[in-house]
């Protein structure tokens, strides 16, 4: 059975082709590397046949050289696509990301807490009064809340700010008017009534102007209130007329006007020039008031405000008043009591 696997037709004298030492080494050596069929180069590193063999067999290429060739032909990644190799840099990026995420979570938690607080308090926050801006140690506290950039729509903020500056100019003008009246009294002691009238005008007109026409126009543009528009037009029209009278100086009630300045030139040239400047400022203020009145009237016609809406707001405002509600409830209770008494007395007879 030792010759069972031999070829019976082979020449026993012929040498086996597998007896060649080079072929035996090539078949017995285990393949190394990961080369595929497409990557294998049969002409790489040719090996001469050993011991004069004529078979022409070649040895497999050197694994070290094959790996060097793969490294040379393998494309390198761009610098921006290569991962971070520095552990310290990786830790720094991770810490920055965690810090940003923590800040975002804290911000969202604060927003949710503020919303919950607003819902618990009834859905709105009470705005603290901030006008006039008084120091904290002052015993008198602010009386109004005012923030034009928050309360007023963007398209009306310029108009409301102009009205606020106009009120401030009016307050400054009345203060300068007191100075002019004092100077007039200094040169002419018979003008005591002018000086007294200028002081009363400053004390009286400055707060009345703020409450009478600036606050109504502020509330009118804030909530598109027809009632406040009507109040503003009524009071500001009186303001325009008063400014024109003050500019002329006809009524001697404390305002320095044109006629007052002309009369002062006979006393002193310096006094005449000073009072003329004050009278010119009076005229400038009257002109500015008239221009703003026309401008706001045009804006008013472009809004949804109307006289009927003003009447409705006035009626609803009266009905929301606690005293009016109490009076109406008392009247209704008296009427019901009187009706019951009348019915009871009629049933007895």
Image (tube, helix red, strand yellow):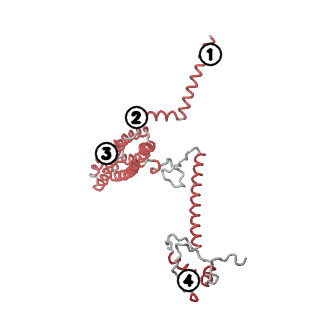
Residue of label 2: 307
Indicate which label's residue lies in the foreground, 3 or 4: 4
Q: Is residue 233 above or below residue 15?
A: above
Q: Nearer the viewer, residue 190 or 252?
A: 252
Disc 4 is placed on an element classified as loop
Disc 2 is placed on an element classified as helix
The residue carrying pointer 4 sits among few (fewer than 14), some (14 to 19) or many (20 or more) residues within 10 Å by Cα, namely few
Residue at 38% in and 40% down = 233
Q: Nearer the viewer, residue 125 or 172?
A: 125
Q: CA distance from mark 2 to mark 4?
A: 117 Å
Res 249 label: 3
Residue of label 4: 55
The residue carrying pointer 2 sits among few (fewer than 14), some (14 to 19) or many (20 or more) residues within 10 Å by Cα, namely few
Q: Quadrant of residue 223?
A: top left
Considering every residue shown, the one lying at the far right of the view is 1
Disc 3 is placed on an element classified as loop
Disc 1 is placed on an element classified as helix
Res 344 label: 1
Task: Looking at the image, tell me whether mark 2 or mark 1 is earlier in sequence order.
Answer: 2
Indicate which label's residue lies in the foreground, 2 or 1: 2
């Amino acid at each position: 059975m030792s010759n069972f696997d031999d070829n019976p037709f082979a020449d026993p004298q012929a040498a086996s082709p597998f007896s060649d030492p080079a072929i035996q080494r090539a078949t017995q050596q285990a393949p190394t590397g990961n080369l595929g069929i497409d990557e294998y180069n049969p002409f790489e590193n040719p090996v001469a046949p050993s011991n004069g063999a004529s078979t022409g067999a070649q040895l497999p290429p050197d694994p070290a050289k094959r790996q060097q060739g793969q490294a040379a032909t393998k494309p390198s990644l761009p610098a921006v696509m290569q991962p971070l190799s520095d552990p310290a840099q990786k830790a720094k990026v991770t810490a920055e990301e965690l810090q940003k995420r923590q800040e975002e979570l804290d911000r969202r938690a604060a927003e949710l807490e503020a919303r919950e607080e607003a819902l618990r308090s009834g859905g709105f926050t009470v705005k603290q009064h901030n006008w006039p801006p008084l120091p904290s140690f002052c015993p008198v506290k602010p009386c109004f809340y005012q923030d034009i950039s928050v309360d007023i729509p963007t398209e009306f903020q310029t108009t409301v700010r102009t009205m606020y500056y106009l009120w401030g100019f009016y307050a400054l003008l009345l203060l300068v008017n007191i100075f002019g009246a004092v100077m007039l009294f200094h040169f002419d002691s018979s003008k005591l009534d002018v000086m007294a009238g200028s002081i009363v005008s400053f004390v009286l007109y400055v707060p009345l102007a703020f409450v009478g026409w600036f606050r109504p126009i502020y509330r009118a543009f804030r909530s598109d209130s027809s009632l406040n528009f009507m109040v503003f037009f009524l009071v500001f029209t009186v303001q325009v007329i008063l400014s024109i009278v003050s500019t002329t100086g006809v009524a001697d009630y404390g305002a320095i006007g044109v006629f007052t300045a002309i009369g002062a030139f006979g006393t002193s040239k310096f006094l005449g020039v000073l009072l003329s400047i004050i009278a010119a400022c009076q005229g400038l203020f009257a002109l500015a008031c008239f221009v703003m009145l026309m401008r706001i009237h045009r804006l008013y016609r472009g809004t949804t405000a109307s006289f009927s809406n003003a009447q409705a707001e006035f009626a609803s405002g009266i009905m929301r008043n606690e005293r009016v509600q109490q009076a109406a409830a008392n009247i209704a209770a008296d009427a019901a009591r009187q009706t019951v008494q009348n019915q009871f007395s009629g049933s007895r007879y």
